[in-house]
Amino acid sequence: MDETAPARPHYAPGVPAEIEPVTQTLDQQLPRAAADFPNRVAIDFLGRTITYGELDHQVRKATSALYRCGVRNGDVVALIMPNCPQHVVAFYAALALGATVAEHNPLAPARELHEQLDRHGAVVVIAWEQTLEKLVSDGDFRGRTYLAVDLSRELPHLSRMLLRLPLSSAREQRAKLRGEVPHGVLSFDRIVKKSPSLPRHMEMEPPELDDIAVLLHTGGTTGVPKAVQLTHRNVVSNMVQTIEWVHTMGYGTEVFAAVLPFFHAFGLSTCLGICIRQAGTLVLLPNFNVASLLAGQKRHPITLFPGVAPMFQRILDEADRQREAGEDVDLSSIRFAFSGAMALDPALAARWEEGTGGYIIEGYGMTEASPIIAGSPVTPERRPSTLGLPFPSTEIRVADPEDPSRDANDIGEVLVRGPQVFAGYLGMPEETDAVLWNGWLRTGDLARWDDGFLVMADRRKELIINGGFNIYPSQVEDAIRDMPGVRDVAVVGMPEDARGESVVAALVLEPGAMVDLDSVRRWTQDKLSHYAMPKSIAVVDELPRSQIGKVMRRAVREELNNFELKSGQWIRKAGALGENASDRFETWLGSLQEQFNATKEQVQEWLSTTSEHSTEQVRGWFAEKGVTAEELRARLQKEGLSREGFSAWLSRSGAAVSGALKSSTEAIQEKLGGSPTQHDEDQKDPLADDGVVQAEPTPGGAGGDAQYTTNAAVPDPDAANAQAAQEAGDGNPAGDDRDHM
């Protein structure tokens, strides 16, 4: 039985049931676009523009440079950097040589990055300078060639010049983009600049469709780190499926907002893939910042916006704020938005469509599916709160979770078959066999059909079983989410003797709200069966989220191990730090260093003793910044972290502790500047050194979200950094990447 047949009548007019088999590999997308539109802007990076002709020329030079570094067909090239022009160049250059690109979160802990590099054995690592600073701090290259990327090189020329001003604010901002790179590490930008453009003597072996194009890291359904292998056929097929879904997508006319990280499947497919295939313009940001995005919108009106729900909320809020201040904000160019990674509130979807006049498409997928499996149709007949319809050439079955050969009567496990389904986990045949069953991808998600639309029940691994009853966390969350005083909620199961698991609701409350278990149960008694009502609650300050903002229930369960149950409420155990205490402490250290431009030693002295025992110089220096040590201690206690624990961690961590910020979307650089200047061809970068990057820290740059003029001063980064800290949550770079894309 073809379970997807009932979905076809709901397709938008012109969307085919099947796509034509792809014939081009991923690396062939850019040369075609450059040949057709050499003068079209390919990238706008904070005001500096690169045309398709220029981008293709840089990629050809980078291909030559990587070849000289020893990269050949079948090798792995690791990219560890934020979204930037060098990322696009390195990506397509490595693919042109038949190499596999391994994408990494540049803000992941060094230990995690080393584990990932060891897993795939990259021969060349191209990384942001600040990542290299922690990655090879001991000078051990482990047999790999490391190339350093300077983010300031691609800023508009005026922004780079402003960073040379002899001001403390300029020095502080330079430090946010540049890092101390070990001696002997080559500059990626310099070797590309000095390399010829694909000399004839190069014996290149281009990739084939079934070669591995990309490695992406995920925790999958179990949380065990894995490298997902996506072939050229996988990635390009999913790109074509998406293009066919948005059947009016133009060639050489679209402008994409590129704010999703490229190391995530969603950002890689839509921005690095689809935009380049369609010869579109990338409004490229190293992280999501609303002011920078709206400035880019004025330079190049965006037509397609891949994002996540919190981004859409922030954009609409900021647009309203600017309009109230008398500024002109026009979002009407955005014809389509793609929402993934988490459920989209129907009210937010309606507000977005009213504010832009365009459609918002909610998608469902996972990294192992390149990543998109289903989406809402581009028609008025969309059904909020569903996962949408299967994409073209995508078969979906709802099967018995215990016996996938049998169809489920109602709710069952989602199985997927199509050209976008991955080739397996690198070096993990048993784990691969567990999710690939007779050609079908077992997603681990539970869903049901509703007239051709797929409706999510929950994830199989997160299903709560109590007394023989199946309880779906998402249904309990939906029942609680609208309760007065509740800002956010995650529901998990905790062991409860012979009955199985008890339903626990982790709540984030509005300021000043008072919510207890009795009030939660009263609120849900008419919405849930008695066995699904929460048996206990835990009040927390925030919920752990992945790098693109999705709540990680697994991390919530782990955190509850540091709590104890008292009268229906989970209370943090005295002195408990939690599984992720080290990450939380490192986040705090990074934020303190960021806010106060402080060294680790200054922070340690400031908080490790009472302020009376700190030196007069350090105490006075922090006092000048406007926040006392007592206030910071109070904030630590509110987070459930003790001053003593933080101090002990600082002492243990030693020089290995990095002050790098910990969120992939908030941290890279909030005050990267950009003026709407013309592309400055090959101007001498006043901040860069020739050849080898020296061991001494080289000053580098950051600009500001404000539009610079010739008499502009380098702005203070604190305000934007504080704003960014609220715009996106930190997350486990190896977090689960399924459910609503």
Image: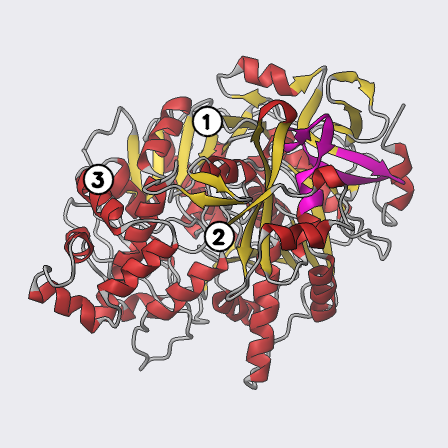
Q: In this view, does 339 lie to the left or right of 636?
A: right
Label 1, on which residue? 204
99 relative to 357 in the view: left or right? left
Measure the alpha-carbon separation of dots 3 and 1: 46 Å
* Tag nearer the camera, 3 or 2: 2
**Which quadrant of the rendered structure holds the N terminus?**
top right
Q: Say whether residue 459 is magenta.
A: yes
User: Residue at coordinates 29% horizontally, 27% vertically from top-left?
Assistant: 144
Q: Which of marks 1 and 2 is nearer the N terminus?
A: 1
> Which tag, 3 or 1, sits closer to the chain's start?
1
Q: Label 2, secondary structure: give it.
A: loop
Res. 492 image quadrant: top right
Label 3 crowd bin: few (<14), some (14–19), many (20+), radius 10 Å: few
**Disc 3 marks which residue?**
653
Could you say where residue 229 lies in the image, as x and y percent from the top left?
A: 54, 26
Near-viewer residue (115 or 268):
115
Nearest the viewer among 423 and 575 is 575
